[in-house]
Each structure stands twice: as structure tokens, then as C-alpha cells.
Image (cartoon, rainbow, N blue to C red):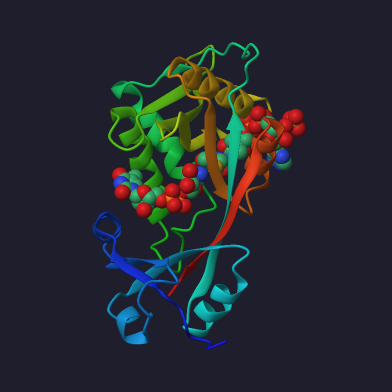
Amino acid sequence: MNNDAIHGQLDYLQWESEFFFQPTAKLTLDSAGPLLTRKALSAYPLVQVKVPAADSSSLDALYYLGFQLVEGEIDFALNVPDAAIPVTSCQLAVAQDIVRVSQLAGSAFQLSRFRAPWYQPRDAGRFYALWAEKAILGTFDSHCLLLNAPDGQLLGFVTLRADENHSARIGLLAVQPQATGRGIGKQLIHAAWQWCREHNIAQLKVATQTGNIAALNLYRTCGGVLTHSAYWLYR
Ligand SMILES: CC(=O)SCCNC(=O)CCNC(=O)[C@H](O)C(C)(C)COP(=O)(O)OP(=O)(O)OC[C@H]1O[C@@H](n2cnc3c(N)ncnc32)[C@H](O)[C@@H]1OP(=O)(O)O
Ligand SMILES: Cc1cn([C@H]2C[C@H](O)[C@@H](COP(=O)(O)OP(=O)(O)O[C@H]3O[C@H](C)[C@H](N)[C@H](O)[C@H]3O)O2)c(=O)[nH]c1=O
């Protein structure tokens, strides 16, 4: 094997480049695409690539080109049950909820590919806070469901968007640190299922980091089946 024979497309990521103040490109592996050169890579301070975990020859070649492992990602598919879904008191988040939902989103996701040293220490929090805000406004993810305690305190939230083929994807899901281990995560999944049912959606997809044991167990406990595993590498 030629050690640096990687083929694929390099695309400038405009939104990320502007949000993180760092010109960034994404490499999409494609054996029929152009040969990737070090010169082409050098045009961008940061290049991201997501590689199927089983594609060890690409992983080797990318390491040879100077890429480094940043994060692993596991994708699940959860069928929306045909049987009755446990009732929750989750509700649709509205504009007045933005501050507290964004606060939780800005601190909950400790594992992220938007981490130092590739990004500034506060970037991941800034990113997930905006993601949650946009979900409430319906501008990135279309809906945000939240669960409040009887005293009105926020316990957790989940964001959702419809995908193709009668499926939907969870964007973000988080529980207040002091409320974890009490079934709130499961209730948020039940609320997401109910949302799917109301939108005629049969399957819910969700991704998390390979190191996120609590989330991996939550999705497995809710019947999730592993569908993809991949690594994020950056250069
Ligand atoms: C799409 C995404 O956003 S992926 C990222 C997920 N979110 C985050 O990582 C944010 C920070 N973490 C959290 O908010 C929470 O820890 C969550 C959402 C992962 C779990 O929420 P919780 O309310 O604690 O989950 P819940 O109490 O409903 O537990 C459900 C199952 O999750 C698993 N689980 C929950 N916490 C843990 C843990 N600390 N270690 C191992 N497994 C765990 C268990 O299998 C549990 O089932 P069981 O009680 O029958 O054993
Ligand atoms: C808010 C926002 C985002 N985008 C773009 C920026 C990125 O290219 C994508 C999001 O990328 P993704 O790979 O999904 O990001 P993460 O790795 O952080 O997400 C995973 O982990 C999360 C914790 C969560 N579980 C998520 O579901 C996973 O995918 O979107 C944009 O273009 N415009 C925006 O407003």
C-alpha cells in the first residue's frame, strides 16, 4: 500500500470557520475522488475527517499524513415502540426557556470533538449553548423538549429534528448533573418517542462519543441498536 494514498474531497466549512474563528475544511473520503496532497491540506489551518472505525487502511494513511485522533463516535437507531409509551410531563421549550436550557447545554457536554487543543477551551460550551438555543427557535434542530421539576427547575432537555425516510435524529440530550441517575434521561427518550409518534416517525437516531458510558448505556437500555462507529481525526 502507498502510505499516503488518500482520495477524497476537501470542502471549506463556512459555518464552523466563522463560529470558531478558524478556517476549517472537512475531508470526505472517496476512492473515486482526487488524490489528497499535503499541499492541498496545508491550505487550511484545520482539516477534519470522519473515518469508519473499520477502515484501518485509511486510518493508517491519515496518520501518515499527520492527522491525529480526536474523538470516537457511535451511532444508534432506536425504534419507536408500537406499544404504549410511558407518559412524561415533558413540554415543548419556548423562547423564555432559552437562557436556562442554553446554560445547561453550555456546561453538560464534557466530551466533544470541539475540544482543546484544536479549539479554544470555551468553544464547545459556546457551541452547544447556541445549538440548544437554535433548537428552541427551530433554526438548527426543529424542536426542544424539556422536563421541569415540580418547582419549575429545569431537569433536562432533548432536541430533535426530522430526517429522511420517516426517521428523526436527537441533536442534544442532557440532564442537570445533580439530577442524573434518577431516570430523567429515560423520560427524555420517552418524550422523544412520543414526539416521533406525533410526527409519524418510526425510527430515532442518536450519536454519542465512544467515551460517554452513561449515554451509551442510556441508548442501549432504551433498545438502541449500534449502527455506525467512526473516528474523528484532525490535522
Ligand atoms: C445526543 C447527545 O447529546 S449524546 C450526549 C449525552 N449527554 C451528555 O453526555 C450530557 C451529560 N450527561 C447527562 O446528561 C446524563 O448523564 C445522561 C443524559 C447521559 C444520562 O441521564 P440520566 O438521567 O442520568 O439517565 P437515567 O437515570 O435515565 O439512566 C438511564 C440509563 O442510563 C445508564 N446510565 C446513566 N448514568 C450512567 C452512569 N453514570 N454510568 C453508566 N450508565 C449510566 C444506565 O444504563 C441507566 O439505566 P439503569 O438505571 O436501568 O441502569
Ligand atoms: C449549531 C450549529 C451547528 N452546525 C454544524 C456544525 C457541525 O458541522 C455540525 C454538528 O456536528 P456534529 O458532528 O453533530 O457535532 P458533535 O460532534 O458535537 O455532535 C455529537 O455529539 C453531541 C454531544 C451530540 N450527541 C450530537 O448529536 C452528536 O452528533 O453542525 C451548523 O452548521 N449550524 C449550527 O447552527
Image quadrant where one finds the C terminus: bottom left
Q: Which residue appears farthest toward the bottom when viewing the image?
A: 2
In the image, taking residue 29 as reference, residue 211 lies left or right, namely: right
Q: Identify the residue at image location x=42%, y=19%.
A: 199
**For residue 13, which quarter of the picture?**
bottom left
**For residue 20, which quarter of the picture?**
bottom left
Residue 39 on image: x %, y % = 31, 86
Q: Which residue appears farthest toward the front when viewing the image?
A: 32
Q: Identify the residue at image location x=46%, y=32%.
A: 168
**For residue 25, which quarter of the picture?**
bottom left
In the image, taking residue 134 as reference, residue 195 lies left or right, namely: right
Q: Nearer the viewer, residue 218 or 96?
A: 218
Residue 15 on image: x %, y % = 26, 54
Identify whether 83 is placed above or below 212: above
Q: Identify the residue at image location x=61%, y=14%.
A: 85
Q: Nearer the viewer, residue 194 or 92?
A: 194
Q: Nearer the viewer, residue 155 or 18?
A: 18
Residue 207 on image: x %, y % = 54, 45
Identify whether 190 is placed above or below 211: above
In the image, taking residue 34 as reference, residue 29 lies left or right, namely: right
Image quadrant where one finds the N terminus: bottom right
Q: Is residue 126 visible?
A: no
